[in-house]
Image (cartoon, helix red, strand yellow):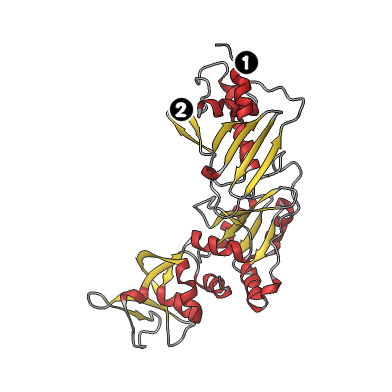
Amino acid sequence: MKASFWKALEALGASGSALCDWKHHLDDDWDACARFLKPTGRTAFSVIDPRQPKRRLTVGVDGDEDFVGYGEDEPSLPPVPFSAGDVAEFSPQWNPIAQALAPAVPFDHGAWETEGQMRRIGSLQDKFGHVRPVLLFLPGGHLGDYTVLLRSLSARTDSTVLFPSGRWLTADIENLRERNGLSFVNIAERLAQFEADPASRVPLPAAGGRPSGSGPAVRALIHAGNDLTWNQVRIEVNGSKMILLKAPGQEREFHFPPNVQVTADHALGMLMRLAADGEWRNPPLGSLEYERVSRAFRRLRQLLQALVPLPGDPFSKLHGAFIPLFQIRLHPGLEAEICRRTPR
C-alpha cells in the first residue's frame, strides 16, 4: 500500500474518475495501486488536461469509439484525443484496499459494512480484550463530503477512524473525537513515514476517551484476524459452567459466574440445547413465553459476538429456526452425564 494512492484519492475522490487521471496522479506507483481500482462501466465526464494539469477538459465523443477532451471556457484551444480506455471511469475497491491496509497499518481486517463513505473494515483488540471498530472514510469528491463525514461520525462511538489525509480534521471533527471517544489516523502520513523508515510503524490507537457504560460486559477471547469466519469457530460446552472457544491457532475458556442458575433460557442452557438439536427455535410469536425467550436468545447472540468479534451474525435463519454458523458440541463427559440423567 502506497502513500501516493491516498493522495490520488484525495485529489480525485472515490465516486469515480477517468483511468488516465488515476495514472497521472499515481505515476510510477500505478502498477502497485491498479488492483485497488475497478471500472464502473461509465465514461468519465471530464479529464485532466495533459498540457496543463491544473485544468480539466470535458469529454466528448469523436467518431464511433474514440473521445476528445475540450475546454468549454476556452473554445480556441485544440481538443485533445483520448482512447476509450483513457476515459473509462474507475473507482476504489473497498475490500482490496482494506485487506492491504490491515497488515500495513495494522489491524484485523473484516468486511463488516458494504455501504456509505464511511465503513467498518476491521477491528482492534487491546490487551484487556476490548474490541474497537476500525472505520475507513473514502470521500466521494463532492462538495457535500464534509457534511456526510460529520453525520457519519456523529453516529459512531469508541472507534478508530482512518482518513486519507489530515485535511478533514477540523475543530468540529475534533470535538466529535472527544465527545464520542474516537481516535483518528492520517493514512497518507502514516504510510509515508513507514516507507521512509519501516521500523517506524506503530500500532493503531486501540483506546480513546471511551464513553462510560459503552461496550460489552465481557472481553473478547478470540482474536478476529487472518480472515477468520464464523464457520471456523468451534464451541465446546463443558461442565463446571464453562465453554471452550476454538479457532485456528487459538483456544480460550469462558467461565460463567459459579453461582448462576443454568435454566433453559440461560445462555449456557441455550448452548446445550443448540449442541443437542443443531438449531434454536423461539416460541411462537403469540406465545406468552415469546418475549422472554427471544430476549434471552438475543443476549446469547450478543455474548457470542462479544467473545468472538467477527462480522455478521453467528446464526442464519431458515424456516423459523436459527442455525449456528459455528460448530458446537457437548464435551463427551457432559454428554455422557446428560444421557445418564435422562429417563429412558
Query: What amino acid is found at the position of numbered circle 1 in the picture?
Result: Arg
Q: Position of residue 84 (x, y in %)?
A: 31, 74
Q: Disc 2 designates what residue?
A: 320
Which residue bears the numbered disc 1?
A: 341
Residue type indicated by callout 2 = Gly
Please tell me whether residue 139 is drawn above or below residue 81 in the rendered image. above
Name the side, left or right, on which 173 lies relative to 17: right
> In the orientation shown, which residue stands out farthest toward the top?
344
Number of numbered tags placed on the structure image: 2
Task: Determine whether 278 is above or below 148 in the image.
Answer: above
Which of disc 1 and disc 2 is earlier in sequence? 2
Quadrant of the snapshot with the N terminus: bottom right
The residue at 75%/30% (across/down) is 257
Dot 1: what SS? helix
Q: Which quadrant of the figure has residue 219?
A: top right
Q: Position of residue 13 (x, y in %)?
A: 50, 68
The residue carrying pointer 2 sits among few (fewer than 14), some (14 to 19) or many (20 or more) residues within 10 Å by Cα, namely few
Between 243 and 163, the one lying in front of the other is: 243
Is residue 165 something one can see in this rendering?
A: yes
Task: State the mark number for residue 13.
Answer: none
Q: Position of residue 275 (x, y in %)?
A: 55, 29
Residue 144 in view here: no
Q: Nearer the viewer, mark 2 or mark 1?
A: 1
Q: Residue at horizontal 49%, vertical 62%? A: 96
Instruction: Report the Cα–Cα distance between label 2 and label 1.
Output: 30 Å
Q: Nearer the viewer, residue 135 or 2?
A: 2
Looking at this view, is 224 or 178 the one in front?
A: 224
Residue beneath the point at 46% across and 81% down = 55
The kind of secondary structure element at disc 2 is loop
